[in-house]
Image (tube, grey):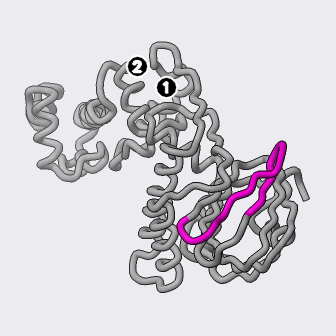
Amino acid sequence: MGQFITVEELPRYAPGEMMLDSSAVGKADFRLRVFRYAPSDIWVPPSDNFLIVIYREGTTAMKRRVTGSWKQDQVGRGVTTLLTRAEASNWRWCHDIEVSHLYISPSLMAKTASEAFDRDTESVELHDLLRIEDPVLTWIADQMVQEVSTGGPGGRLCYDAMALQASVHILRKYASVQFKMPCAQGRFRPAHARMIEDYIEQNISRNITLDELANICNCTPVQFARKFQAHYGMRPHSYVLTRKVERACEHLRKDRLALKEIALLSGFSDQSHLNRIFRRHMSATPAEYRKQCTG
């Protein structure tokens, strides 16, 4: 066993009857499990995931120690416990309970924080809270349990949407987020700029999405668009369209290909699309431009 235990290893330290597991439906970085537990006194090593415990059935006094002294409170339906990662914990309770466990990876929380707050995230830590009453988390957990239990068309999409909703809610109310320092002037590093330009050149013949470009330098789409504007003085879409027109110009000057072929090679949907964008940029149609170059 390494420094942190995984989701799969947790039942070795907190043995119970597992009633449900979302592994076949949802993403591995936001996993749901439902357990029934008898009265227990357990020690759990540090985990590599954040843990949210949402009580479904049963009422009991719960004692927990993470660092320092023991804390105790009454838990039952509608109560939630939060535990940050990387800390060992002791738990004691004296009555049967059924709980939902939400295991959330730090990488997912950091990515969600970057998108939610529109800033590059360094790290996320949850507050250690033994008892909170949060109807939103209770409702989301119940809906996720129902979705995993019954299934249906679009089950994965539904589960992932609820996982995102839960992650944003937790970030807003129960997390400390450390952000990275912004890059100077908001511009790309030279290496990133070259990678972006090369990617556009190599993929100019097809539709290039903002998400693809943002992934090159590990930005959110909003962050990427802002940095692109600062670096190139235009929006990504405008830059790509300009490069498509320039590629079409190269073919018109050098090749005798039909205009519909040039349109596809340059990344336009058809000849009509090429004509419309080309005239806007060059104040001439492709045919007129070719005639000027060869005349």
Q: Nearer the viewer, residue 261 or 93?
A: 93
Q: Residues within 10 Å of mark 2 (few under 14, many from 20)?
A: some
Quarter the N terminus occupies:
bottom right
As drawn, is 189 to the left or to the right of 72? left
* Residue 255 visible to an observer of this rendering: yes
Q: Which residues are magenta?
A: 62-78
- Seen at 57% across and 34% down, the residue is 121
**Is 135 on the left-hand or right-hand side of 255?**
right
In this rendering, would 134 be left or right of 57? left
Residue drawn at (57%, 21%) of the image:
181
The spot of residue 69 in percent (x, y) is 83, 46
As for residue 285 lying within the magenta part, the answer is no
Q: Where 19 falls versus 279 (above or below)? A: below
Viewer can see residue 213:
no
Q: Nearer the viewer, residue 153 or 98?
A: 98
Q: Residue at x 65, y 41 (%)?
A: 125
What's the amino acid at mark 1?
A: Ala
Q: Residue at x 86, y 68 (%)?
A: 41
Q: Nearer the viewer, residue 99 or 257?
A: 99
Identify the secondary structure beneath mark 2: helix
Q: Earlier in the sequence, mark 2 or mark 1?
A: 1
Label 2–label 1 contact, CB within 8 A: yes
Tag shown at residue 6: none
Amino acid bearing label 2: His
Residue 262 position in % (x across, y down): 25, 45
| Disc 1: which residue | 193
- Residue labelled with disc 2: 231
Q: Picture coordinates of residue 231 (x, y %)? A: 40, 19
